[in-house]
Amino acid sequence: MELRTRRLLLRPWRADDAGDVAVAFDIYRRWEVARWLGATPSPWPDEATAREQLLRWQVFSDEHPGYGLWAVAPGSDGDDGTPVGTVLLMPLRDGADVPTGEIEIGWHFQPDAWGHGYATESASALLEHAWAMGLPCVEAIAFPDNGPSIKVMERLGMSHQGETSRWYGATFTWYRIDNPGG
């Protein structure tokens, strides 16, 4: 499934595409990206890990239509540009890594792509997708010192819910947005 915004294409990551594997590895090998991901952050060590992870993402999306992780590529209509990040719509997991019924929206971008509005624009498109799927609300979490992600949550119109340790075995700042259509 693909989504388009004025400036961006959101499309599945492709484990069988050497370019996607190399770009994903470049994003997730970086400590400045990985440090914000999960209770025990770990940069990806090599392209083989990137390929395995993209394959897991593909399988998840195939098994759970409408959910998953999308590559975010700047470009005009018909232009399948090089991805600069990821936007996701996934079940949150508790501290034992068990999926909960709550759905998370999130974003991870290559540092050179920070500050261009890509996270807000792609997440807005994904929220519209979530509402079209009939989701009643969507959650977002960030480490308390991840100011840029918290600003994205606020730009999306999400409401601050406080601090929580309900998910992923770590303490996060928690935001939520309700489906405006009820």
Image (cartoon, rainbow, N blue to C red):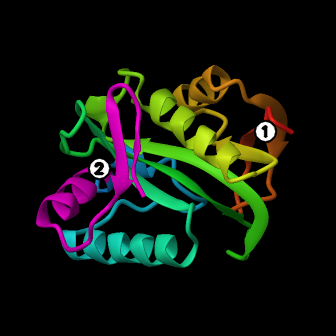
User: Can you give x and y, in whole percent of width and height, for residue 162 in the image?
Assistant: 84, 35
Mark 1 is on which residue type? Asn
Quarter of the image where the N terminus is located? bottom left
Q: Residue furthest left?
A: 18
* Picture quadrant of residue 33: top left
Relative to the observer, which residue lies in front, 24 or 178? 178
133 lies above or below 65: above
Measure the C-alpha gap from mark 2 to mark 1.
Answer: 31 Å
Q: Where residue 27 is drawn, which disc sits there?
A: 2
User: Can you give x and y, in whole percent of width and height, for residue 63 in the image?
Assistant: 54, 79
Q: Is residue 143 left or right of residue 175?
A: left
Relative to the observer, which residue lies in front, 171 or 158? 158
User: Can you give x and y, in whole percent of width and height, for residue 91 in the image?
Assistant: 67, 63
Q: Cβ–Cβ below 8 Å for labels 2 and 1?
A: no
Dot 2 alpha-carbon crowd within 10 angstroms: few under 14, some 14 to 19, many 20 or more: many
Q: Give the SS element for disc 2.
A: helix
- Whether residue 8 is in magenta: the answer is yes
Q: Where residue 69 is drawn, which disc sits there?
A: none
User: Can you give x and y, in whole percent of width and height, for residue 104 in the image?
Assistant: 66, 52
What residue sits 51% from the left and 53% below the top?
37
Q: Earlier in the sequence, mark 2 or mark 1?
A: 2
* Picture quadrant of residue 169: bottom right
Q: Where residue 179 is drawn, which disc sits there?
A: 1
Q: Give the SS element for disc 1.
A: loop
What residue sits 75% from the left and 51% below the top?
134
Mark 2 is on which residue type? Ile
Dot 1 alpha-carbon crowd within 10 angstroms: few under 14, some 14 to 19, many 20 or more: some
What residue sits 28% from the left and 68% below the top?
50
Tell me the magenta residue range.
Answer: 1-27
